[in-house]
Image: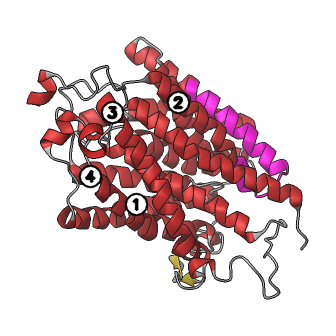
Amino acid sequence: MELDTGATAWMLISASLVLLMTPGLALFYGGMTRSKSVLNMMMMCFGAMAVVAVIYVLWGWSMSYGSSIGGIVGNPFDQFGLAGAVYDEAGEFLLDDYGVPGIVGVGFQSTFAIITVALIAGSIADRVKFGTWLAFTALWATLAYFPMAHMVWGGGLLSGDGPFASIAAPIDFAGGTVVHINAGAAGLVLALVIGRRRGFGTVPMKPHSLPLTMLGAALLWFGWFGFNAGSAFTADGFAGLAWVNTTSATAAAIIGWLITEKIRDGAATSLGAASGVVAGLVAITPAAGALHPLGSVVLGLVAGVLCALAVGLKYRWGYDDSLDVVGVHLVAGLWGTVGIGFLATDTGLFYGGGASQLAVQVIIAVVAVAFSLVVTAVIALVLKVVTGWRVSEDVEVTGIDQTVHGESAYEGIGAGRFTTQEARA
């Protein structure tokens, strides 16, 4: 195999686009929080970048793609510190099957790990210790993300080499199970373990800057082309198909969300449009290389409706998923993963492929949810005992930005103030 400079350039650009998604997420989440904690939310996203990028080089790559331990996780010592993952015996760069240096693949995959952990932050906005969040970031990436990546993409239990492939080869093109179901289930666990914000359900907790949220959604959509089209691993027809499917599904999800809002609430909102963007992107992620663009429109439209309805469940069931990680990422991730079983052009039920693909997609979705729930619960409960999750009541009411980070996002215009109603909550 010779170096393919075109494919290499494609993957470097794709990796850079995916890395951009985490600052985009910081803007998306930051706009949705209250002004007194916007910097803390952005810091949680940037903190995930800092921690995960380091541990990925140390043991994350090896745990994801090293020699398998029971089909669950790669051996962390197999390629610890990227030993044997960069150069061959002659000192030349190792190349993958597309003629791309392996070190480029390391960079690309590290950005997936970063954004997955950062997604979880939205479920626990306004109320957690920054140090505990950083500890959780390292532990969760190690014990939940890396094993899931190995199971799905590293030849493990949920891959085409696993036991379920005897029914049909599982499909997860770019991370429906690894990223979105994994992060969404983790967000639900943390919301339950940590508890609700003071005043949840009684004090208005509206987004403080919808323009920031819209800008963040735009950057996420732009970066997502690296996420999905980049997962073709070279610049070919599958990359083009993933690009078009990503656009089609996302646009359809916006329409589905806005129609649902208009019927239910009487208004189609900018927050709904931004949330619809993310719902569509999440849903098409596992399916981007397996659907026709028309099927992607169907997938995205359904995702927009489902997620618009699902984000209200937290008020009915009483869990405080602050920025709708569960309602968007878990729900759309589940639908996108299962929807492949209906809409895949080669094996989908609606295309005459029978029920085998659908059965396998349901199985891998259920396994992913169960794995993430259990592992996250253990980590969350241990940290609750060892370090504690919650900031003090005074800090929560006053605002984490000023009291923890010593800064305010909007100096000179009343940043850090809180209402009498908030203070009494």
**Relative height, residue 360 to residue 25 (above, below):** below
* Residue 284 marker: none
Circles 3 and 1 in contact, beta carbons < 8 Å: no
Q: Of label 2 and label 4, which has the lower sequence position?
A: 4
In percent of the image, x 59 and y 31: which residue is there?
A: 218
Select label 2 or label 4 by which is in front.
Answer: 4
Q: Give the residue pinned by disc 4.
A: 129
* Distance of label 2 from label 4 (alpha carbons): 30 Å
Q: Give the residue pinned by disc 3.
A: 408
* Distance of label 2 from label 3 (alpha carbons): 30 Å
Circles 2 and 4 in contact, beta carbons < 8 Å: no
The magenta segment is 228-254
Select label 3 or label 4 by which is in front.
Answer: 3
Select label 2 or label 1 by which is in front.
Answer: 1
Q: Give the residue pinned by disc 2.
A: 276
Select label 2 or label 3 by which is in front.
Answer: 3
Q: Give the residue pinned by disc 1.
A: 137
Q: Quadrant of residue 150?
A: bottom right
